[in-house]
Image (cartoon, rainbow, N blue to C red):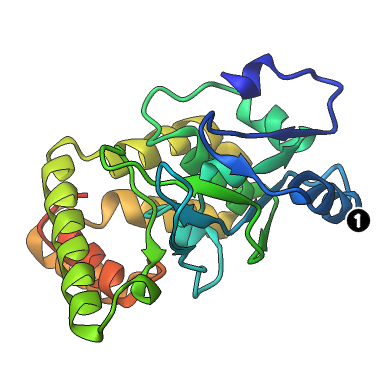
C-alpha cells in the first residue's frame, strides 16, 4: 500500500490509478495549496476529475459535493475520488496508527480521518482524466447529461444509475460494511475524538437497535450524503438496518 510504503520524510503523498491521465498542473496546484496550510494539521487535498471512456472520449465531470465535507458525511459516504488525493505526512501518521481490517477502501478511511482530526481541501478544478471502463467495480458518479441528445435520455440514464446503486446498497447491506467500518474507526480512534464526534459516532452505532429507533434516527440524525437521492437511500437503509 502506497501509504505504508511512502517515505516518512515525504511532505506529501499522491495517489494514482494506473490508467488515469493526470492533467499538467495537478501536482503543482496541490502542493501550492498544501504549502499554505500548517503541516502539523492532518490534511487531505482532493480535486474533481473529468470522466472519460477507455479511449479518452469525454463522458462528463465528477459531481461536485453540494454540502460540507464533514465527519457527519464521512461516516456514511465518500464523495471524493481516491485517485485525486494528496495527503500530508501528518495524515499519513494518523493512518499508520493501525491499518484497518474493515475499511470500505483507503480513500473513504482517509476521508474519515481528515474529517475527524484535520482538514479537507476540495478543489473543483479537475486534476485528472478518470477512465470509466464498462466493467469498473466502483463507477464514478458524474454529470453526463451533456452527452445525451435530449433530456428524456438523460433522465432515463440517471434513473437507471440510481436503480443500480440501490441494488448494490441493498446487496452490500447484508454485510453491514459501513457500520463495520464505523465500529472499527471507533475502536482505533475513540480516545482521540472530540466529545462531539464521539457522540455522533456512538449514536450512529447504537441508535438502530430496533425499528422505532431506526426510524427516529433516519428522520432526525445529523449524518448525511451529498445528493437528495443518495440521502433518501441512506434513510431507507438505516430504517431497514441495511447499512
Horizontal side of residue 107 vs 229, given as left or right? right
The residue positioned 46% from the left and 57% from the top of the image is: 79
The image shows residue 60 at horizontal and vertical percentages of 44, 64
Residue in front for this viewpoint, 191 or 181: 181
The residue positioned 51% from the left and 40% from the top of the image is: 107
Q: Check disc 1 and report its element: helix, strand or loop.
A: loop
| Viewport quadrant of the N terminus | top right
The image shows residue 242 at horizontal and vertical percentages of 15, 50
How many marks can you see? 1
For residue 15, above or below residue 46 = above
Can the viewer see residue 242 in this picture? no
Residue in front for this viewpoint, 38 or 217: 38
Q: Residues within 10 Å of mark 1 (few under 14, many from 20)?
A: few
The residue positioned 15% from the left and 64% from the top of the image is: 160
> Farthest residue in the top direction?
5
The residue singled out by tag 1 in the image is: 36
Can the viewer see residue 70 in this picture? yes
For residue 240, above or below residue 104 = below
The residue positioned 18% from the left and 83% from the top of the image is: 152
The image shows residue 103 at horizontal and vertical percentages of 40, 32
Residue in front for this viewpoint, 167 or 239: 167
Horizontal side of residue 121 vs 78, given as left or right? right
The image shows residue 201 at horizontal and vertical percentages of 42, 52
Amino acid at each position: 500500500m502506497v501509504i505504508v510504503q511512502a517515505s516518512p520524510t515525504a511532505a506529501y503523498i499522491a495517489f494514482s490509478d494506473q490508467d488515469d491521465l493526470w492533467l499538467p498542473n495537478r501536482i503543482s496546484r496541490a502542493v501550492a495549496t498544501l504549502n499554505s496550510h500548517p503541516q502539523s494539521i492532518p490534511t487531505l487535498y482532493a480535486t474533481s476529475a473529468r470522466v472519460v471512456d477507455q479511449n479518452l472520449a469525454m463522458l462528463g465531470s465528477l459531481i461536485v459535493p453540494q454540502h460540507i465535507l464533514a465527519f457527519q458525511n464521512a461516516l456514511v459516504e465518500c464523495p471524493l475520488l481516491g485517485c485525486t488525493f494528496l495527503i500530508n505526512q501528518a495524515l499519513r501518521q494518523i493512518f499508520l496508527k493501525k491499518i484497518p481490517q474493515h475499511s470500505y477502501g483507503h480513500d473513504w478511511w482517509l476521508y474519515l480521518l481528515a474529517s475527524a482530526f484535520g482538514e479537507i481541501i476540495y478543489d473543483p478544478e479537475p486534476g485528472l482524466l478518470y477512465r470509466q471502463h464498462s466493467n469498473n467495480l466502483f463507477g464514478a458518479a458524474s454529470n453526463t447529461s451533456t452527452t445525451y441528445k435530449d433530456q428524456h435520455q438523460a433522465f432515463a440514464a440517471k434513473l437507471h444509475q440510481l436503480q443500480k446503486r440501490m441494488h448494490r446498497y441493498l446487496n452490500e447491506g447484508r454485510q453491514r460494511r459501513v457500520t463495520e467500518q464505523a465500529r472499527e474507526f471507533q475502536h482505533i480512534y475513540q480516545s482521540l475524538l472530540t466529545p462531539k464526534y464521539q457522540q455522533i459516532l456512538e449514536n450512529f452505532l447504537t441508535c438502530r437497535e430496533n425499528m422505532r429507533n431506526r426510524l427516529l434516527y433516519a428522520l432526525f440524525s445529523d449524518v448525511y450524503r451529498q445528493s437528495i437521492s443518495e440521502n433518501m437511500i441512506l434513510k431507507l437503509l438505516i430504517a431497514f438496518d441495511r447499512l
